[in-house]
Amino acid sequence: MIDPQTPSQGELPTAAQLLRSTIIAIVAAAAILVTVVLPAEYGIDPTGIGRALGLAEMGEIKQQLADEAERDKADLAEPGLLDRLVSAFLVGRAAAETKPAESKPAARTDETTVTLKPGQGSEIKLVMKKGATVEFAWTVAGGAVNFDLHGDAGEKSTSYEKGRASKGEQGVLEAAFDGSHGWFWRNRGSADVTVTLRTSGAYSEIKRIL
């Protein structure tokens, strides 16, 4: 019995037809290789078609990336390089973690004495950072004084406390901003007076203005 779906001998391709089809396939594959694959993958463009289509540039980029990857691999393969890189990273991280905080003025203690004639004024200032504190106490011998506890820095200024006919004050001064903070005294009496100021805390300098 003959299968009706089996092609007859006349319907089968001849040897010449098979050879022609094979040659056409080989030529087409070669054309695709030369015009598409080589430019897109390796940046090789013997016909110029790949560059016109933008494929050659893509292939050149791929080759550059491949070359860089090979160089990086070769660098890492250098004896001891990876260990040095790891060591440098660890040292850098440790240095960042142990970086000292912004330096602050060390606590200091001073005693300052000022003698004021009748009508005379004088001013003592402490150089302080914002938020720094100083414990203070001052006394007047021989009379009393008017005073103004204040701070200034450029265009900034503030008054913390004022008083009249005082024989002494004590407390804690907290700087409202970076700058100079301290006391102005004036002798409104008829005799000389001596003001003794004791300070202890976070300030970098003490200076007499008047």
Image (cartoon, rainbow, N blue to C red):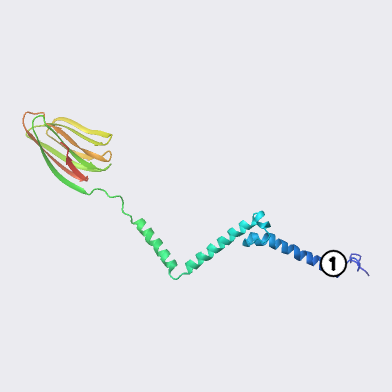
Of residues 124 and 79, the one nearer the viewer is 79
Residue at the front extreme of this rendering:
47
Give the residue displayed 81% in from the left and 65% down from the top.
21
Give percent across and percent down for residue 59.
61, 59
The residue at the point 50 percent across, 68 percent down is: 74
Q: Is residue 199 left or right of residue 83?
A: left
Which quadrant would the N terminus be assigned to in this image?
bottom right
Could you tell me which quadrant the C terminus lies in? top left
Residue 129, percent from left and from top: 26, 43
> In the displayed structure, would residue 140 be above or below residue 109?
above
Give, as a three-letter code, the residue at label 1: Gln
Residue 32: % across, % down: 71, 61
Quadrant assignment, res 124: top left
Is residue 139 shown left or right of residue 156? left
Which residue has dot 1 on it? 17
Q: What is the quadrant of residue 151 in the picture?
A: top left
Q: Position of residue 108 (x, y in %)?
A: 19, 47
